Amino acid sequence: MNEIQLIEACKNQDAIAQRKVYEKHASKMYAVCLRYLKSDAEAEDILTQGFLKVFSKINLYKGEGSFEGWIRRIMVNECLNHLRRTRAMLMTVSIEKAQYYEADSTDTLHQLEAEALMECLQRLPDGYRTVFNLYAIEGYSHKEIAELMNISEGTSKSQLSRARELLKKYIKDIEKTSNISRNA
């Protein structure tokens, strides 16, 4: 069964097709959820809620754009809704006080293993992590982030800046630790 046939079968509430869609996309969508949420349990819960929404709203998918992208957008929105419901996500930061990150030529972000980067992302405060994910990974603009999160564009920019600064610090800490263990 190709993707179009799977989608049509899901629109007819075919449980086998739903299982195939879930099995095909669950691991990637779990990784999306885990980038926004701090625990495996939260990510699993939101993944489940997200797929329930995918299957209940699948008639809204018009075949425009990738199906995986449509699912990803639902997962991101479910994560944001969960964060809104469960946490005070953001610390108010004045844009004037924010220091902007400038990548240096020896930026080691690209050299980190995925697991180490994920650990760094998990250490970020919820608001910073959410804005970073939306901007740097999902590709949203600051205007879109502001609308999604009900914050100002300036707050989005400052949250991103602070997230980058903290990530830079966490990465330096990892580099120091790995240099110490190599020299020991």
Image (cartoon, rainbow, N blue to C red):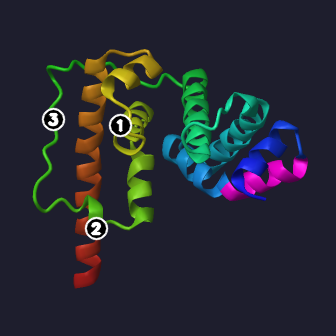
Q: Is residue 4 above or below residue 73?
A: below
Q: CA distance from mark 1 to mark 3?
A: 15 Å
The part of the chain drawn in magenta is: 15-24
Q: Element at badge 3?
A: loop
Dot in front, 1 or 3: 1
Q: Are marks 3 and 2 in contact (CB under 8 Å)?
A: no
Q: Quadrant of residue 91?
A: top left
Looking at the image, the residue that sits furthest to the left is 105
Disc 1 residue type (three-letter): Tyr
Whichever of callouts 2 and 1 sits on the residue coming sooner in the sequence is 2
Mark 3 and mark 2: Cα distance apart in space: 22 Å
Q: Which residue carries the number 1 mark? A: 135
Mark 3 / mark 2, whichever is N-terminal: 3
Task: Return the residue at label 2.
Answer: 111
Marks 2/1: CA–CA distance = 20 Å
- Find residue 173 and report its horizontal and vertical position in percent: 26, 59
Q: Which mark is residue 29?
A: none
- Quarter the C terminus occupies: bottom left
Tell me the quadrant of the picture where the N terminus can be found: bottom right
Q: Residue 88, relative to residue 121: is it above or below?
A: above
At mark 1, the secondary structure is helix
Instruction: Name the N-terminal-most of marks 1 and 3.
Output: 3
Residue identified by numbered label 3? 100
Look at label 2 and name its amino acid: Gln
Label 3: few (<14), some (14–19) or many (≥20) C-alpha neighbours in 10 Å: some
Q: Is residue 145 left or right of residue 96?
A: right
> Mark 2: which secondary structure?
helix
Contact check, label 1 and label 3, Cβ < 8 Å: no
Side (left or right) of 12 relative to 35: right
Q: What residue lies at 29% left-to-right and 78% top-to-bottom?
A: 181
Residue at image coords 29%, 34%: 160
